[in-house]
Each structure stands twice: as structure tokens, then as C-alpha cells.
Amino acid sequence: MFYIPSFIANRSIFKGNTTMSSLCDTLACVVCGGGNGDEILSSTKRCTSCAQKVRNIENKLNEFGDADDIDTTDIDTLSDGFSRIVISDNRLFREPPPKEDCSICMLPIPFSSGDTMIKTEYKPCCGKMICQGCMVASDEEMAKGNLKMLCEMCRVPIPSNEEEYIKRVKKRMKLMDSQAFCMLGSAYANETWGLPQDIDRALELYNQALLLGSNTAQFNLAHEYFKGELVERDIDKATLHYTLAAIGGHERARDGLGIIEVMKGNMDLAQKHWMIAARSGYELSLQKVGEGYKDGFVTKEEYATTLRAYQVSVVEMRSVQRERARTIP
């Protein structure tokens, strides 16, 4: 179970005869899960409240000019003050949206990059994502002298050092690129790109990224709250962000919801989450569904259907280049 923020739940649209089930099964904000048809902006799919927060970020970027100077969201903006209004099971357990495609080979890329053996690379010059297969093929051609050391998409020179890479990421942030916010947040959380570890800054950047619609940011927040290593462990907040990421199609977030249901003793619900993730091509969830079949929590028909869907999903993401890339350390 997870809840909608109180600043949305207290609106007048939740009063009278409006039911939560009918509301959540129609239009909902891609950021917070709330709102209805009258309050969702069709161009961004955000509710008016979240849209205003995005405008605040953009205004601060324009005002300060440097992404390091902005501080527009509290660390727990979307995690505080939740009221007990439940998002319906119909929305929570519906099939996820289609995966995004690699900008070069146009094959699907899983949201949980790397976990299904398909890694991705973010291009800070143009904001494109390319898969590991295309990365390796491009590197090999550059090594042979057949390609110049340029971005495969926008033909801008590849950054020569971490400082230049960060500079380009910050430029993408000024263009309200959610992935840029998320990437810089990960760098602060994991102490990469030569940056010091700063979990508060990382959480702020994740919150800004999720306001821009980043599923990865939702997952990263959930993962931090679930682990409890850099922040105090909070299963409720982890569940919230896992849920929003899973609804958006993040396979590993869906797998995480299954783990939380096991912690609660709800094995049937856990298997429902794992079957959805497995059908999307997530191998670790498929293994758990197989174990559930052996233990009697999954029927033979459910396991067979899940396995077939997993195989179809994997085939759709497979290519010769990606298979070769898997063998390279």
C-alpha cells in the first residue's frame, strides 16, 4: 500500500462522491500519482502543483546560472505528510508502459540498466541514451580510425575529462533534462566524477529529477531509503518511490516492491510484482517466480505465461552487438 501526498489529497477534488479508485484509474500525475483530468497538464502529464515546482527549478536555474547554486526542493518534498488515500490495485498492477529505445539501434532498453546485462551510456552533450552494444561498436570503429572521437548523435567532441563531463551535464540541467539531474545526483551519492560524497545534495537532485518525470530518480530515492546506509532507513518512503517507479515501468523497482511484500508476509502480492517484472525481461524476478512455482505460490499456467513473456521481451532487446558487449569487462 502507498499513499498520495497530503497537499494533493486535501484538494477539493477528493471531497464529495469522488472515489479514490475511479480517480486513480483515470489521469494521474506522472510525478506524485495524484490529480485528475481537470488538473493534469496534457503537455507534461504533471499536476498543477508539481508543474509549479518544475517552474521554480527552471526560474532558479535562470537566476543563478549554475546548477550547484540552486536549492529549490526540500530533501523529502514528496515523502512528507502522506494521507491515507490508497492508489488502486488496478493501476498498481497494470502492465508497464513500453520501454524507451536506444537512440542508435532503436532496440528497447530496460529501465534498470545493467541488471539485465544491457548497460547504457548518457551523452551529456545532447542528452541521448545509447546501449552498450552501440557504445562498444562505436569505440571499436574509433580505435580503428574509421570514426572521429565525436558523439555518435550530435557529432560534438567527446569530453576528455570528468570536469568537462560535469560541465556538460550542468548545461543539460539548464535545459530541464531529468536525466542530467539524476546523473549528477548519482555522482554525489556514489562519490564519482571526482565529486565528494554529499547525500543531501544527491537527494535534492533526485527530487528535482523526479519532478521532471525521471523513473530512475524515483528508484534511486527508493533504493537509498530501503538500504538505509547513507540515510535513515524508511520502508514507507522506499515503498512510495518504488511504487511510482514501478508504475512507470522500472523493472528493478517492481522487484523491490516484491521484496517489501515478502517482508510483510504477503507472498501472493510479491509474486504478482515479480511476474510483472519478469514479463518485462528482468531475470532476477523470473528466478523468484520459478522459486514461487516450486513452493506452490505460483500456478503452472502463471509460470509458463510469465516465462514465455520473459523470452519475448529478451528477444526484443537482443542484438549481435549487445551480445558481444556482454563479453567485454
Image: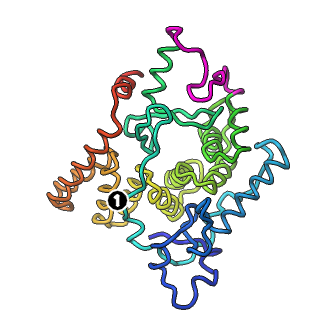
Magenta highlight: main SS: loop
Residue at image point 53% right, 48% down = 216
Query: Which quadrant is the C terminus positioned in?
Result: top left
User: In the image, residue 81 lies at what x, y percent?
Assistant: 62, 72
**Residue most extreme to the left:** 300
Q: Is residue 204 above or below residue 185?
A: below
Badge 1 marks a residue whose secondary structure is helix
Q: Taking 164 as reference, is 123 left or right?
A: left
**Could you tell me residue 77's position as x and y percent?**
66, 62
Q: What residue does disc 1 label?
A: 273
| Residue 89 sits above or below residue 321 on the image | below
Residue nearest the viewer, comparing 201 with 324 = 324
Q: Is the residue 166 above or below the residue 228 in the image?
A: above
Residue range corresponding to the magenta coloring: 143-164
Compared across the picture, whether 225 is left or right of 105 comes to right
**In the image, residue 313 lies in the stretch drawn in magenta:** no
> In which quadrant is the N terminus drawn?
bottom left
Q: Is residue 225 above or below residue 140?
A: below
Q: Report the residue at 44% width, 57% height from top.
A: 246
The residue at the point 59 percent across, 78 percent down is 9
Question: Is 102 on the left-hand or right-hand side of 295?
Answer: right
List x then y, in percent, for residue 299.
16, 61
Residue 20 in percent (x, y) is at 48, 80
Horizontal relation, residue 300 to residue 328: left or right: left
Q: Amino acid at mark 1?
A: His
Residue 159 magenta: yes
